[in-house]
Image (cartoon, helix red, strand yellow):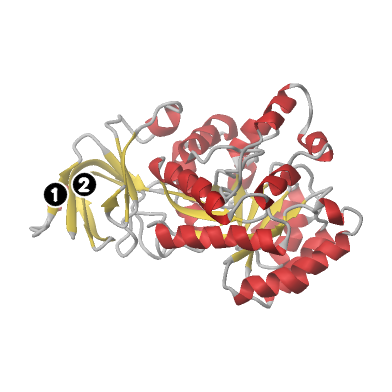
C-alpha cells in the first residue's frame, strides 16, 4: 500500500544512504526539510522532498501532517527488557542510603533478578516482556537490542534468548539479541569463577550458536564482576561463532575494558560513566561506537557519561535506555534524549543523532533504520503540533508523539 504524507512541518534526519554514523562536529548537524512530503510503499521509504516539488502520485492513502513533524523512530541499542518482576525494594534501599554495590553484596542486584527469572515460566516471561516492548514502541522506539543475562544457567539464558526470538517473530520491529551470560557470577560459582567462565565457553556459547539465538555477545567488565582477562577469554571464545561484541564497561571504574573491547572489534562499548584520556585515545583508533545510558545515571545518581569529552574529541556517541529492573526501569527514549541535553550538555541535534542514526549503527542496522533515507524501513514518529524539534527535549515531561509507524503501518 502506498501512503503519502503531505504538509509535514519539518522532515527530520534526512540522510543519504552512504552515511552510517556521525561523529564530532557532524553530530551538531541535523539535516531537515521544511514543508515536506514523504512517500512510502510496502513498508519502505521511496521518496521525499519539498511540497513545492511534489510529483503527481497515484497513492492508496494520503495523510495530512500540517503543523506536525516526522522523524525516524528511536534506535535503542542497549536494553534488558526480558526480565521477571521488579526490584522496587532496592529502589527504597538506595533512598535509605545503600549503594548499588552494597545492595549486590546483600543478595540484591542482578542475582535478585536471576532468582526471579529462573522461577518464571517461558510463557509468563514472554508476556511480561511483550508488554514492555509494546510500551516502548508506543514511546517511539522502532529498533531495539535485547540482552539475556538474568538467567546465568544454560537453561535460563536459553529461555531468555528464546523469548527474544519469539518477540522477533511476533512484532514488526527490528530486534537484535545479545548473549550476556557474563553479566554476573551465579551464587553457586561464587568461589569458582573460572568454572562459570568455562561453562559459558564450553556449553553456553556452542549451544546458543547451534540454535542461532544471538547476534551479539556482551560481558560486564567491571570490578567485582568480570575482569579484563575474563572478558578477553570470553570474547576470544565467542569469535569462532561470529558473535560480535557489545561490552558493558567503565560504569564505575576504568580497568582497561575499553582497550580489550576494541581489540576484539567491539561494535559498541556501553556505559562509559568513567572515561580516561587513555580510553579516548583507544576509541579514536577504532570503529567502535561509544554508547551512553543517561537514565541509568539519573536513576542510580551516578556520574553521567562525559558526552562533551567524547564529541569534542571527534568521536561518535549513541544514546540508549539500558531498560532493566535494577538500574533503569524505563525504556523511554524521549526521556533519554531530554536527559542527555539537560545533564550531558548535548544539543538537541546531537541527542537526536545519537538516538537515531548512531543508535542504528550500534546494532548493525544502519541499512534499515535510523534516518529518513530512500530504501530504509518506513519506521518513523509523527509528532503532535510543536514549534521546533528542540521542543522535544525541552518539554521533557510531555508526550509529544501523535503516532508511530513501523514498516509503514500505524501502530
Decide: few, some or many residues near mark 2? Use Cα within 10 Å; few <14, some 14-19, many ≥20: many
Quarter of the picture holding the N terminus: bottom left
> Which residue does the numbered mark 1 point to in the structure image?
62
Q: Provide residue 386's location: percent of width, then percent of height.
A: 30, 30
Query: Is 338 left, or right, of 408 in this rendering?
Result: right
Residue found at the very far right of the displayed protein: 191
Residue at the location (63% across, 56% down)? 148
- Graded by Cα atoms within 10 Å as few (under 14), some (14 to 19) or many (20 or more), the crowding at tag 1 reads few
Disc 1 versus disc 2: nearer the observer: 1
Q: Which mark is residue 145?
A: none
Q: Which residue is mark 2?
A: 36
- Identify the image quadrant of residue 294: top right
Q: Secondary structure at mark 1?
A: strand
Q: Residue 180: name its quadrant.
A: bottom right
In the foreground, 377 or 113: 113
Q: Residue at x 60, y 57 (%)?
A: 160
Q: Position of residue 9 (x, y in %)?
A: 23, 39
Q: Is residue 377 left or right of residue 130?
A: left
Q: Whole-Å distance between the Cαs marked 1 and 2?
A: 13 Å
Q: Judge left or right: residue 70 versus residue 392.
A: left
Residue 387 in sight = yes
Q: Nearer the viewer, residue 285 or 161?
A: 161
Q: Residue at x 37, y 64 (%)?
A: 17
- The kind of secondary structure element at disc 2 is strand
* Residue 275 in view (yes/no): no
Q: Position of residue 293 (x, y in %)?
A: 60, 42
Compared with residue 378, is residue 399 higher up or lower down, i.e. above or below?
above
Question: Which of the two labelled residues, at mark 1 and mark 2, occupies the earlier sequence position?
Answer: 2
Amino acid at each position: 500500500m502506498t501512503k503519502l504524507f503531505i504538509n509535514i512541518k519539518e522532515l527530520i534526519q534526512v540522510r543519504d544512504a552512504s552515511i552510517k554514523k556521525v561523529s564530532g562536529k557532524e553530530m551538531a548537524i541535523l539535516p531537515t526539510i521544511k514543508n515536506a512530503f514523504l512517500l512510502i510503499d510496502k513498508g519502505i521509504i521511496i521518496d521525499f522532498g519539498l511540497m513545492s516539488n511534489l510529483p503527481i502520485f497515484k497513492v492508496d492513502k494520503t495523510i495530512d501532517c500540517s503543523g506536525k513533524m516526522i522523524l525516524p523512530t528511536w534506535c535503542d541499542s542497549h536494553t534488558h527488557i526480558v526480565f521477571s518482576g521488579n526490584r522496587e525494594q532496592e529502589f527504597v534501599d538506595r533512598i535509605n542510603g545503600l549503594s548499588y554495590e552494597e545492595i549486590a553484596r546483600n543478595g540484591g542486584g542482578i542475582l535478585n533478578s536471576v532468582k526471579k527469572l529462573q522461577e518464571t515460566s517461558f510463557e509468563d516471561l514472554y508476556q511480561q516482556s511483550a508488554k514492555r516492548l509494546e510500551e516502548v514502541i508506543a514511546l517511539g522506539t522502532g529498533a531495539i537490542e535485547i540482552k539475556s543475562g538474568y538467567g546465568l544457567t544454560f537453561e535460563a539464558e536459553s529461555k531468555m534468548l528464546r523469548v527474544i526470538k519469539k518477540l522477533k517473530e511476533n512484532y514488526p520491529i527490528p530486534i537484535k539479541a545479545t548473549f550476556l551470560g557474563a553479566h554476573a557470577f551465579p551464587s553457586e560459582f561464587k568461589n569458582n569463577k573460572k568454572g562459570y567462565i568455562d561453562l559459558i565457553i564450553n556449553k553456553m556459547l556452542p549451544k546458543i550458536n547451534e540454535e542461532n539465538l544471538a547476534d551479539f555477545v556482551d560481558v560486564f567488565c567491571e570490578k567485582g564482576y568480570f575482569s579484563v582477562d575474563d572478558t578477553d577469554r570470553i570474547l576470544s571464545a565467542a569469535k569462532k561463532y561470529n558473535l560480535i561484541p557489545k561490552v558493558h564497561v567503565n560504569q564505575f571504574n576504568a580497568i582497561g575494558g575499553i582497550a580489550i573491547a576494541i581489540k576484539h572489534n567491539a561494535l559498541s562499548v556501553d556505559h562509559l560513566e568513567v572515561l580516561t584520556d587513555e580510553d579516548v585515545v583507544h576509541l579514536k583508533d577504532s570503529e567502535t561506537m561509544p554508547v551512553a545510558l543517561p537514565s541509568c545515571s539519573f536513576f542510580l545518581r551516578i556520574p553521567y557519561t562525559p558526552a562533551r569529552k567524547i564529541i569534542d574529541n571527534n568521536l561518535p556517541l549513541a544514546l540508549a535506555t539500558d531498560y532493566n529492573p535494577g538500574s533503569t526501569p524505563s525504556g523511554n527514549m524521549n526521556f533519554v534524549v531530554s536527559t542527555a541535553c539537560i545533564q550531558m550538555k548535548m544539543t538537541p541535534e546531537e541527542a537526536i543523532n545519537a538516538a537515531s542514526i548512531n543508535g542504528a549503527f550500534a546494532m548493525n542496522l544502519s541499512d534499515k533504520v535510523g534516518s529518513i533515507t530512500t530504501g530504509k524501513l518506513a519506521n518513523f514518529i509523527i509528532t503532535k503540533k510543536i514549534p521546533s524539534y528542540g521542543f522535544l527535549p525541552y518539554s521533557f515531561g510531555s508526550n509529544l508523539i501523535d503516532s508511530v509507524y513501523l514498516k509503514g503501518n500505524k501502530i
